[in-house]
Structure formats: structure tokens, C-alpha cells
Image: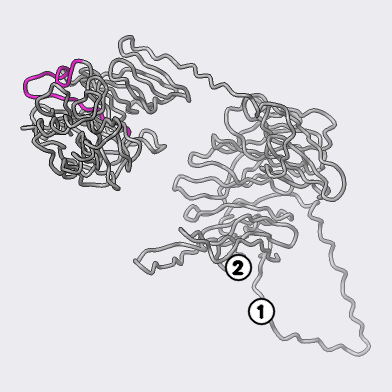
């Protein structure tokens, strides 16, 4: 690129770096601004292009935009940059009206016939467009030449000695990762066009970005101490200094006025940092509005339902919608708003087994806690848990209605006694979160799924009498979605144990699909096989002896399921798992009732088109 003023005898060269690479070769990318510093062989850094504007800012809208770039020391536009369809920059000289990269008769005609002022035609910068602009442009350059990608816009510069600019070979922050040290971590360099040398100025493997050259220092942000803070690099002695030491929120998207102030976003607010005082002041921004959305009004929540459930006998349904808990009749009656809380977000309701109470999650105290409310709204909600510091996930009642199990975003699983409000932590996942958990039929055990150290999920059972968890599925296979059989004899789960991948038609690549199978786990050693082997044989009727009557003894009464004690033999429990007689598929949403397993079959995921099949709900008789 080149810049000149009315008093210049020839354009001064400046350095422009773009992510497209040397001479415009390389991939496309985004840039938000580039700072230029001018210098020739006989002048210092600040006096090269005038005493006011030693630095010029390029502001780019996007990678396909025409962008204004070169300004004079008085702020007038002299030259602009144009970007090709793949982000490759090339300069356009003042007077190049048709933006074809060269000065020719067409440009001369356009300037001479211009009826109004256009800064692109005012090469003399006198505020008037006339034939003098044509003569001036021709005189100072001897005619502009067609530009190559990324090359100078003028041939009037004899050498590249003394020009420098900073750059990063990686793109800017459009990613959510923190403390990243991989190959795309931003590094900062100073490039010297006299020697074509690039000097690395960042001193760590993490992201170093958003550089701003102010005076003799380059300011940038880095998360090398764990948070994105401001650093400065002194170009005179090569020393790096940490300017801020925030431990709460990252500094994001800093930008400077090229003199002594930097503005950035932190904690959702804008702050202005003064370099001289080393202090950041938060901007108070007030956006006036009519407060329409804060006015009292009635809103239909029919299309705003976030979760739902049924009463134990199915007479009414419970819904969480727009931050309140509602119940509605299945056939006849009215809808009730049980919480009616405009100051809280109530969600994830669960109806107690006796139908009297509904548990839910609410942030009424400022943090999410477990609350309960009578099913008919006859009294106010009661807070069950206290002191929480993490987002809560769905609560589930034990069969006796005395306890609730729930998890949170700290990957912990809890059991709380509703009457005493005592909370007990029963599991803590090192990897991932705990979403799948269920009480045993009599409430003595909790089955849950958590990720193990090898990255696969396993099913665990927590014993309330021992206050201990047992892993009941093998570590080498992923398993989850545990569902108790109402009899208390079996635990069903889904496990990924089928590996018969599809082969790509274009390359020899694997695409795994339909890996899941449903398994039944016998909880005691005396429990019969739930799906015994069946073999049809000929039935032989025994011969009757004349005159002799056979009397069959009455069958022994079998104990009812409610009379049997709930117990689990954990010794060798993994080896008692048997496969439900179903072919491998994409199973989900497993549940069990008396005599049946209910599950969903989901279609495979395709990139770019819909799957040929739809998800379906199915059942198998146990």
C-alpha cells in the first residue's frame, strides 16, 4: 500500500499484513483491523507521515467488503483496499475510479467529467475535483501500475527499508475454548519488511491476540495465567509486562484509540483502561425504553411448556411453563397455577406417589433449590434444600414419598429427606454429569449412570443401608438408562455392545450405527432367567389307571411382591446380565412396567439430509 499528502513528492510505503499470506497466497480469513506504521530511511517512527497520524487504522467490515484504509494526517481518505472473494487484499490508488487496480484513460475521463465531489477523485486533497487532480496523480507517480495480489499500489517507493508491522498467523477469537495450547493458539510477531524477518514476541503456548501498537509498546491479551489479562511488549528492550491480574472474568475484544486508552468487554460490561494511570473504569450505559415487556399482562403458556408429568393415577397432568408450575385435568375441570411466581423460574415438577405433593426446582432464593407444594395449591410452597451453588436437575420421589433424589451441574447426586430436609451426597462424577437415576421399587437403592475414568458410562447402584455404590456393568462397554422392574428382581439397561459398522462408499471409513442392545440384570442369584430358552416338544398324555383317581396337591401360595424383602446380591452381579431378545438398534428412553418393556428406537443421524425412518415407541413383553 502507499500513502501521500499534498506536500509529498512521492508516496511513502506502509506495511499491510493480511491472513491470506505472503503475496496473497493462502486461505481466507477474517480481520477486524490492522494498524500501519510509516517510516522511510531518513525519519523516525512518529514523524514519517506527519506529526498527528503516525499510525493509520484499517477497518474491515468482512472478508468480501470494500474497505476505507489510508488517511492523511488531517483525516482525508487517500487510498482504500479492496478484497477479492476469498479475502485476498490489493490496494486501489487515489483516482482509480473503476477499482481495477491501475491508472488509465478511463479514470482520467471519470475525474474530468465528475459533477460532484468524490474523495476518490480528489488526489490533490484540496476539496475540489478538477483536471489538476489528474495531472497531480500522474506527476507524483508516473502512472499507477496494475497490482498483484498483496503487492504495493505504487511503483514510486524505491526500497522496503525500515517498515514494520505486527501480526498473528492465526485467526482471532471466534471459539469458546479457554487455556488452549494447540496448533490454532494465536501467536504474535513483528515483521520487518527490510529483512523479511518475523520476530516472535509472545512468550507462551496459549492464545495471545488482539494486539494494539501504542507508542513503543504492543498491548495484547493472553490467558497464559488462566484468565485473559492485558500484557504489554516493549519494542525498545523486548520485555513483556503483565498489566492486569483479573481472576474473575476474562478481558475480551480489546481495542485502542492509538494514543492512551483501551476499551474491552469484561463480565458483560464495557471498561475503558487508561494506560497512564493503569486503571480501568466501567462505562455506565443506559438504553432508554418504554418498558413494554415489564408491564403486567396475560400471556398464553400453551406453547412455552418445558417439562411435564402425570399424577399417580393419571387424573391430572403437571406442567412447567414460563417459570410457573401448573396442573390441568385430563378431561374435566380447571387449570391451577401452583406457584404464581413472577420473581422466580420454577421448573422440573415431579408428582409424589401418594398424589398429595409436587416437588420442583426453583431459583426463588437466587440459587436453584428443591421445593414442594400441595397438589391443589392449598398452601404456599416449602423450600426443602438450602445452600446450593449449582444448577439442579430433575428430582424423583422414592416409592414411600419420603425422599427425593436429584443431581446438579457440579456432577453430584443427592438424596434428601423431605421431612427432615437433610441432604446426603451419594455420588460424584469426575467426568461428565449425572442425568439418569431412578429409585428401586421400595426405595432402598438408587440406580444411576455416570462416566468412568476410561470415558465410557457404567450403571451403578447405591445401597442406602451401606451408603455405598456398586458398579454393576462391565467397564469395557458403555451402558446407561437403567430401569427397575416393578417386581424388584431385575434391572434393565441399554448397553453399546454391537460393533458392525457401515462402510463408506467413497473411502474405507467406518460409520457406527445401531450399536445398542437392551439387557436384563438379575439382582439376586435365585432369580430365574427373565427370557428362558424355549423349545417346542411333543406333549405326551399319561395313561390313566382304571378305578384310581389322581389328586393333584394344591399349589403353594407365592408371596406377593410387596411382602418380599428388597435385597441385591452384588457378588458376581455383572455375570448375571442377559440380553433381551431384540436385535441391536438405536435404543433410548427405556422404562419397565409389569410384564412389558417400553423403549424408543431412534433413526441414525445423517449430515445434510433426513433419515429415511422416524423415531418410534415400542414395547416387548417380559
Q: Which mark is residue 535?
A: 1
Question: Residue farthest to the right?
Answer: 547
Q: Is residue 493 left or right of residue 51?
A: right
The residue to which callout 2 is attached is 582
Residue in front for this viewpoint, 52 or 266: 52
Residue in front for this viewpoint, 305 or 616: 305
Q: Is residue 5 left or right of residue 488?
A: left
Q: Is residue 7 left or right of residue 455?
A: left
- Indicate the secondary structure of the residue bearing disc 2: loop
**How many labels, in total?**
2
Counting residues from the start of the chain, the first of labels 1 and 2 encountered is 1
Q: Residue 489, image x and y in percent?
A: 70, 56
Residue drawn at x 21%, y 33% as measured from the top left = 94
The quadrant the N terminus occupies is: top left
Quarter assignment of residue 547:
bottom right
Q: Which residues are magenta?
A: 32-51
Foreground mark, 1 or 2? 2
Residue drawn at x 45%, y 62% as measured from the top left = 512
Q: Residue 273, image x and y in percent?
A: 36, 16
Q: Residue 231, image x and y in percent?
A: 29, 21
Compared to 541, does 599 lie above or below?
A: above
Q: Main secondary structure of the magenta part?
A: loop
Residue drawn at x 29%, y 34% as measured from the top left = 115
Residue in front for this viewpoint, 36 or 418: 36
Task: Confirm whether the magenta stretch covers residue 91.
Answer: no
Task: Confirm whether the magenta stretch covers residue 35.
Answer: yes
- Label 1, label 2: how far apart the Cα atoms are: 18 Å
Q: Residue 304, image x and y in percent?
A: 67, 42
Amino acid at each position: 500500500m502507499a500513502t501521500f499528502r499534498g506536500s509529498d513528492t512521492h508516496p511513502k510505503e506502509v506495511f499491510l499484513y493480511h491472513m491470506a499470506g505472503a503475496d496473497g497466497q493462502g486461505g481466507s480469513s477474517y480481520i477486524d483491523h490492522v494498524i500501519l506504521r510509516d517510516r522511510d530511511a531518513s525519519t523516525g517512527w512518529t514523524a514519517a507521515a506527519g506529526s498527528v497520524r503516525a499510525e493509520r487504522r484499517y477497518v474491515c467490515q468482512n472478508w468480501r467488503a470494500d474497505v476505507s484504509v489510508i488517511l492523511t494526517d488531517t483525516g482525508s481518505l487517500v487510498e482504500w483496499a479492496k478484497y477479492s472473494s476469498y479475502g485476498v487484499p490489493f490496494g486501489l490508488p487515489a483516482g482509480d475510479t473503476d477499482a481495477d487496480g491501475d491508472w488509465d484513460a478511463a479514470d482520467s475521463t471519470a475525474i474530468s467529467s465528475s459533477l460532484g465531489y468524490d474523495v476518490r477523485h480528489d488526489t490533490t486533497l484540496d476539496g475540489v475535483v478538477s483536471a489538476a487532480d489528474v495531472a497531480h496523480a500522474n506527476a507524483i507517480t508516473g502512472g499507477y501500475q496494475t497490482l498483484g495480489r498483496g503487492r504495493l499500489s505504487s511503483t514510486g517507493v524505491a526500497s522496503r527499508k525500515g517498515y514494520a508491522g505486527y501480526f498473528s498467523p492465526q485467526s482471532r477469537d471466534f471459539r469458546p475454548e479457554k487455556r488452549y495450547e494447540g496448533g490454532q493458539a494465536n501467536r504474535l510477531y513483528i515483521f520487518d519488511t527490510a529483512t523479511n524477518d518475523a520476530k516472535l514476541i509472545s512468550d507462551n503456548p496459549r492464545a495471545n491476540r488482539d494486539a494494539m501498537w501504542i507508542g513503543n509498546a504492543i498491548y495484547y491479551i493472553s490467558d497464559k495465567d488462566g484468565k485473559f489479562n492485558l500484557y504489554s511488549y516493549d519494542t525498545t528492550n523486548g520485555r513483556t509486562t503483565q498489566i492486569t491480574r483479573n481472576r474473575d472474568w476474562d478481558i475480551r475484544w480489546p481495542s485502542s484509540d492509538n494514543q492512551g486508552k483501551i476499551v474491552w468487554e469484561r463480565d458483560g460490561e464495557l471498561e475503558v483502561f487508561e494506560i497512564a494511570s493503569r486503571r480501568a473504569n466501567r462505562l455506565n450505559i443506559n438504553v432508554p425504553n418504554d418498558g413494554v415487556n415489564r408491564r403486567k399482562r396475560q400471556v398464553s403458556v400453551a406453547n412455552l411448556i418445558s417439562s411435564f408429568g402425570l399424577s399417580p393415577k393419571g387424573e391430572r397432568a403437571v406442567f412447567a411453563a414460563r417459570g410457573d408450575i401448573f396442573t390441568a385435568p385430563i378431561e374435566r375441570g380447571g387449570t391451577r397455577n401452583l406457584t404464581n411466581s413472577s420473581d422466580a423460574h420454577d421448573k422440573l415438577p415431579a408428582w409424589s406417589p401418594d398424589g398429595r405433593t409436587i416437588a420442583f426446582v426453583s431459583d426463588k432464593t437466587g440459587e436453584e433449590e428443591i421445593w414442594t407444594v400441595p397438589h391443589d395449591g392449598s398452601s404456599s410452597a416449602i423450600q426443602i434444600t438450602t445452600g446450593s451453588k449449582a444448577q439442579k436437575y430433575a428430582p424423583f420421589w422414592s416409592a414411600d414419598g419420603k425422599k427425593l433424589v436429584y443431581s446438579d451441574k457440579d456432577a453430584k447426586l443427592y438424596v434428601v429427606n423431605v421431612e427432615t430436609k437433610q441432604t446426603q451426597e451419594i455420588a460424584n462424577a469426575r467426568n461428565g454429569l449425572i442425568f439418569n437415576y431412578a429409585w428401586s421399587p421400595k426405595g432402598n437403592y438408587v440406580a444411576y449412570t455416570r462416566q468412568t475414568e476410561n470415558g465410557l458410562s457404567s450403571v451403578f447402584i447405591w445401597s442406602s443401608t451401606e451408603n455405598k455404590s456398586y458398579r454393576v456393568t462391565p467397564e469395557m462397554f458403555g451402558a446407561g438408562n437403567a430401569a427397575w422392574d416393578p417386581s424388584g428382581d431385575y434391572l434393565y439397561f441399554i448397553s453399546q455392545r454391537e460393533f458392525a459398522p457401515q462402510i463408506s462408499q467413497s473411502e474405507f471409513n467406518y460409520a457406527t450405527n445401531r450399536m445398542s442392545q437392551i439387557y436384563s440384570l438379575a439382582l439376586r442369584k435365585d432369580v430365574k432367567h427373565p427370557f428362558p430358552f424355549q423349545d417346542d416338544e411333543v406333549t405326551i398324555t399319561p395313561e390313566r389307571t382304571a378305578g384310581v383317581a389322581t389328586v393333584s396337591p394344591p399349589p403353594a401360595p407365592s408371596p406377593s411382591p410387596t411382602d418380599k424383602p428388597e435385597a441385591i446380591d452384588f457378588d458376581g452381579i455383572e455375570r448375571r446380565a442377559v440380553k433381551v431378545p431384540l436385535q441391536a438398534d438405536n435404543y433410548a428412553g427405556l422404562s419397565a412396567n409389569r410384564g412389558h418393556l417400553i423403549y424408543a428406537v431412534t433413526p441414525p443421524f445423517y449430515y445434510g439430509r433426513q433419515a429415511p425412518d422416524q423415531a418410534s415407541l415400542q414395547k416387548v413383553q417380559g
